Amino acid sequence: MERKRNGKESTPSLLAIDSQSVKIVQFINQETGIDGDKNVNGRKRTILVDTLGLPFSIKVTAANISDNQAGILAVDLLKGKVSRLQKIIADMGYKNTFQEYIEVNYKWEVEIAQKPESTKGFIPQKKRWQVERSFGWLNFRRRLFRDVEKTIASAEAMLQIAFISFIINKL
């Protein structure tokens, strides 16, 4: 309904994917791990969003799961939900296994966006900044700056509730 309110088709033809590793609080021991690249002991949130930043898939895994594996799990949740989808924009973390899996199993194009090597820090990338903005929105929720949920299901539910509140606030 939010997409139609913004003059768009009900399902997107383009999605952007990314992940965010978040620390966990004490006493959480289900589905946790250490993301060696980001030096975070916790969980990884993988989301696929449209050009409005609305999530079409949310998957929470242990942080030590690669972006390729987590991305495949998140995309598999889209099955039958996005009839118009043609392309997924991703960063270099999704270059190998993910890209091949999507192109073989779903026949969607995967475009790997990358910033110039000479730049440092955050550079907004065309058609991919929406997913970064969505993670920024989540960081405004005090309960979500760390993962405090005991189970993966409740962690995913809290992310869904946060996105629902963002949509309601736009009305």
Image (cartoon, rainbow, N blue to C red):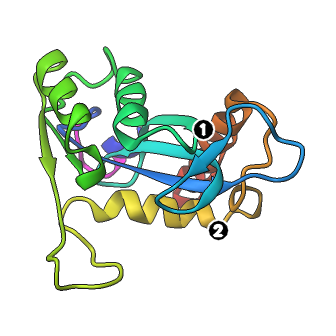
In this view, the residue farthest toward the front is 36
Q: Would you name the residue on which mark 1 appears?
A: 62
| Residue 149 in the image, given as x and y percentages of width and height | 79, 41
| Numbered disc in front, either 1 or 2 | 1
Looking at the image, tell me whether mark 1 or mark 2 is earlier in sequence order.
1
The residue under the point 54% across, 42% down is 64
In the figure, residue 144 lies in which quadrant? bottom right
**In the figure, 40 relative to 95: above or below?**
below
Q: Quadrant of the N terminus?
A: top left
| Residue 161 in the image, given as x and y percentages of width and height | 66, 42
Q: Is residue 6 magenta?
A: yes
Q: Which residues are magenta?
A: 5-9
The residue under the point 27% across, 74% down is 124
Q: Which one is nearer the viewer's eye here, 117 or 124? A: 117
Determine the CA span between mark 1 and mark 2.
Answer: 22 Å
**In the figure, 163 relative to 118: above or below?**
above
The residue under the point 15% across, 52% down is 112
Q: Which one is nearer the viewer's eye here, 121 or 87? A: 121
Res. 140 mark: 2
Identify the element where label 1 is drawn.
Answer: strand
Please tell me whether the stretch drawn in magenta is mainly helix, strand or loop.
loop
Q: Residue 91: in sight, yes or no?
A: no
The residue under the point 42% across, 47% down is 54
**In the figure, 148 relative to 154: above or below?**
below
| Residue 62 in the image, given as x and y percentages of width and height | 60, 38
Q: Residue 53: in sight, yes or no?
A: yes
Q: Amino acid at mark 1?
A: Ala
